[in-house]
Image (cartoon, helix red, strand yellow):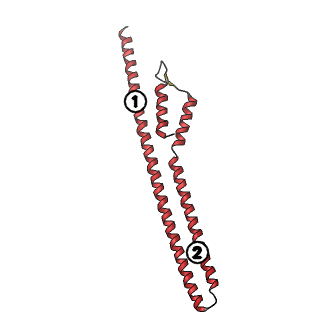
């Protein structure tokens, strides 16, 4: 359930709660209220879970790049051993091995850079989404508090009028 929907349910509980005759307090079902608070807590960390998934994907990309690089190095070593027969062939094999190693290292660096960029982008998106949700929740909570302040102000005015009326009747 969406965080804002949960906050709306919380507001609805407050609006529908019975008022006590004295003091203006409300009566709400504690179990239902605590359940709703737990649901709100569970709704907030989605961005954090998404960030963890992005980090895991980054780690998998790094592992894949290392495995690919090692496979290229192993292939180069195997080919070097095959070509050890003649000195010219050996020199060519060494050059090829170096080229393969350099290519593997370059590819590994590029894969790591790509993974870092992807992870950073996903983390940035997740942080922006989390920030936006928190800002929305804050705005919504402030509007609920403003409405409650207005309602409480009305109750206080009614109490003042009642007290004044009682004073005047004496």
User: Any mark on residue 41, and which?
Assistant: none
Residue 84 place in picture, x, y as percent? 63, 87
Circle number at residue 72: 2
Q: State whether residue 100 is above or below residue 133.
A: below
Please report the residue visible at 48 percent of the width from the left and 40 percent of the height from the top: 3
Q: Secondary structure at mark 2?
A: helix
- Mark 2–mark 1 distance (CA, rounded to whole Å): 67 Å
Q: Position of residue 88 (x, y in %)?
A: 58, 91
Q: Residue at x 43, y 46 (%)?
A: 132
Q: Quadrant of the C terminus?
A: top left
Q: Is residue 158 left or right of residue 58?
A: left
Q: Earlier in the sequence, mark 2 or mark 1?
A: 2
Residue under label 1, please give it: 147
Q: Looking at the picture, tell me which residue is in the foreground, 144 or 73.
A: 73
Looking at the rendering, which quadrant does residue 98 occupy? bottom right
How many labels were placed on the picture? 2
Q: Position of residue 63 (x, y in %)?
A: 58, 65
């Amino acid at each position: 359930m969406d965080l804002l929907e949960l906050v709306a349910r919380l507001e609805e509980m407050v609006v529908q709660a019975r008022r006590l005759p004295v003091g203006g307090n409300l009566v709400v079902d504690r179990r239902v209220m605590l359940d709703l608070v737990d649901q709100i807590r569970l709704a907030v960390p989605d961005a954090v879970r998404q960030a963890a998934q992005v980090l895991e994907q980054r780690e998998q990309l790094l592992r894949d790049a290392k495995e690919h690089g090692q496979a290229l190095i192993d292939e180069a070593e195997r080919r070097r051993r095959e070509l050890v027969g003649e000195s010219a062939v050996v020199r060519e094999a060494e050059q090829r091995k170096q080229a393969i190693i350099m290519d593997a290292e370059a590819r590994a660096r590029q894969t790591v850079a790509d993974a870092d960029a992807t992870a950073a982008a996903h983390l940035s998106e997740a942080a922006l989404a989390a920030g936006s949700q928190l800002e929305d929740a804050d705005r919504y909570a402030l509007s609920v508090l403003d409405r409650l302040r207005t309602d409480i102000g009305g109750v206080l005015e009614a109490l003042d009028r009642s007290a004044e009326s009682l004073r005047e009747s004496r």
